[in-house]
Amino acid sequence: MCTVKDVAATRFIKAFAKHMKRQGKFEVPKWADVVKTGPSKDLPPYDEDWLYIRTASIARQIYNRGNSGVGSYRAIYGSQKRRGTLTNKGMKAGGKIIRYCMQQLEEMGIVEVDEDKGGRKLTPEGQREMDTVAVQVAEMEEEDDDE
């Protein structure tokens, strides 16, 4: 049995983002093409599918860590702010984007709110769906190794 932890992170995130896009349950908001991902950024992301990739990455983080809220993911997805001649300073990412991704994962049935510990946790259906994508990625990696 292959799980999400057995597969390379970048390959899984790309595959899960494609899976969510194919399903059509994920709603991309109007502001997705103009919003910055945090105060340390100057421009919005260049990739049109960046929101799918961020959501897949958050889903993987919840799979691995669990019971974490928006604040902890703001620190994970934050970056350094360039301040000219001053030294760089660490900044947190925007919370609205992370909150929106988690809400969409809840609507899709992958994640639910954990009443006991706080934060979000995976549902059994979400874990099954993510493990299915991980098995597909592992098969693709085996085919690449054979060639």
Image: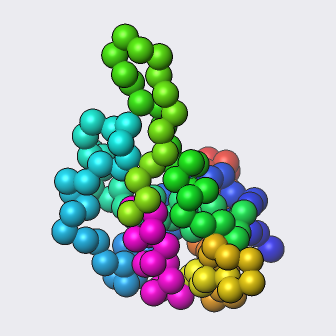
Asked whether the viewer can see residue 99, the reply is yes
Asked whether the viewer can see residue 132, the reply is no
In the depicted structure, whether residue 17 falls above or below residue 8:
below
Q: Considering depth in this image, is 84 or 128 the residue closer to the camera?
A: 84
Q: Is residue 114 magenta?
A: no
* Residue at 47%, 85% in the rendered image: 108
Q: Considering depth in this image, is 80 or 147 the residue closer to the camera?
A: 80
Q: In the displayed structure, does residue 115 sit left or right of residue 17?
A: right
In the depicted structure, whether residue 90 falls above or below residue 143:
above
* Residue at 39%, 62% in the rendered image: 97
Residue 147, percent from left and from top: 61, 47
Residue 77, percent from left and from top: 51, 48
Q: Considering depth in this image, is 7 or 77 the residue closer to the camera?
A: 77
Q: In the displayed structure, does residue 98 sit left or right of residue 62?
A: left
Report the residue that reaches farthest toward the front.
Answer: 86
In what quadrant of the picture does the N terminus appear? bottom right
* Residue at 36%, 56% in the rendered image: 50
The number of numbered badges drawn on the structure is 0
Residue 82, percent from left and from top: 39, 24
Report the residue that reaches farthest toward the top.
Answer: 85
Report the residue that reaches farthest toward the right.
Answer: 1
Looking at the image, what colour scheme do you see? rainbow
In the depicted structure, whether residue 41 falls above or below residue 38:
above
Q: Is residue 107 magenta?
A: yes
SS majority, magenta: helix
* Residue at 70%, 71% in the rendered image: 67
**From which residue to which does the magenta span run?**
97-109
